[in-house]
Amino acid sequence: MNYTEALQIPPGKAICYSGFREGQDPGGVFPSYEEVKEDLLILQNQWKYLRLYDCDLHAETVLEVILKEKLDFKIMLGAYIVAEANNYGCPWGGSYAEDQLEENKSINRKQIKRLIDLANKYPDIIFSLSVGNEACVDWTDHYVPVEKVIEYVKMVKNEAKQPVTFCENYLPWLDKLKDLVEVVDFISIHTYPVWEYKNIHEAMEYTKSNYYAVADTYPDKPVVITEAGWTTYSNGKGICPTNVSEEFQSIYYHDLMEWCMDADILTFVFEAFDESWKGSNEALEPEKHWGLFTVNRKPKKVMRDHFSLL
């Protein structure tokens, strides 16, 4: 289904944006107004749509900068929901005390309320809303049962006018999330060939197969790719180091963009800037290196032709 019609937005390039720099993280220091402004000025001529993951101070700053500086961005705003049930299958820790899970439910309801409030405060900037991110997949450390995600979708739809979705790996949409499909306005999938041990030569066909597996299952529901990308380093844990480089990132990005434009698929590239706070303390931790720009805002190979002066 054509996303421009379904979401009532013009075609455009999209990217995931989180502005945390060296020494900053969501639990500590947040990017300043001027830092966010610097980021958005870098991004403004290449991308129309930005995806934000949380309703925290960072999101407020981004929205304020866009409004005050009159920047031409539209936002997919997310609420980051935390664990409401134990997930003992998570390899990096998905179990919590019962009192913590109860407290998390209260935290999540406040997050959803915040999502609604910001959506209504910035209706001309925020074009869509997500009630969570990777909270239903088998390996998540912040597991939320599908029925609760459905409840959150309904809450948002009752109080905000923007289309509502939930962002998740492509695979659960094929079975586990079928009931959720009925209530969201569009489906949002993540596809990462390199995490599934595909090399660069297999990458695009695998991405396409992930997308069409979901899109063909639900032909009457728009499907958006809310994460797709290629990291530039790996410590060998989960991703083979020989499968990642700036060269491979550039190949995948350009192939992805060509296919998405030809097929009219809204795709948020993951991600704008490297984030050093993510993952383990190892320097080559792949979670730190998905950006098209380094944490110091220098363009990697994929962006060098467009940003040669940075």
Image: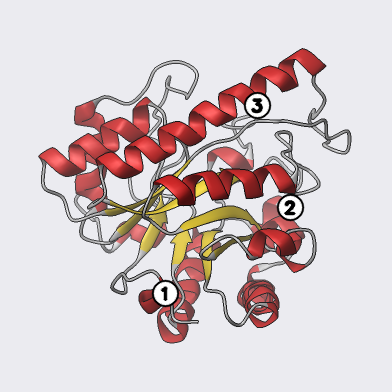
Number of the label disc, if any, that sits on residue 94: none
Graded by Cα atoms within 10 Å as few (under 14), some (14 to 19) or many (20 or more), the crowding at tag 2 reads some
Q: Position of residue 176 (x, y in %)?
A: 79, 59
Q: CA distance from mark 1 to mark 2?
A: 39 Å
Q: Going by the image, does 123 lie left or right of 294?
A: left
Cα distance, mark 3 to mark 1? 32 Å
CB under 8 Å between discs 2 and 3: no
Q: Secondary structure at mark 1?
A: helix
Identified at 73% across, 48% down, the residue is: 146
**Residue 105: which disc?**
3
In this rendering, the answer to whether 42 lies above or below 34 is below
Q: Earlier in the sequence, mark 3 or mark 1?
A: 1
Horizontal side of 219 relative to 35 (left or right) equals right
Q: Residue furthest right?
A: 88
Specify the amino acid type for callout 2: Cys
* Mark seen at residue 6: 1
Name the residue beneath numbered marker 2: 240
Q: Nearer the viewer, residue 174 or 275?
A: 174
Residue at 88% across, 38% down: 89
> Would you call the spot at circle 1 few (<14 residues within 10 Å), some (14-19), or many (20 or more)?
some
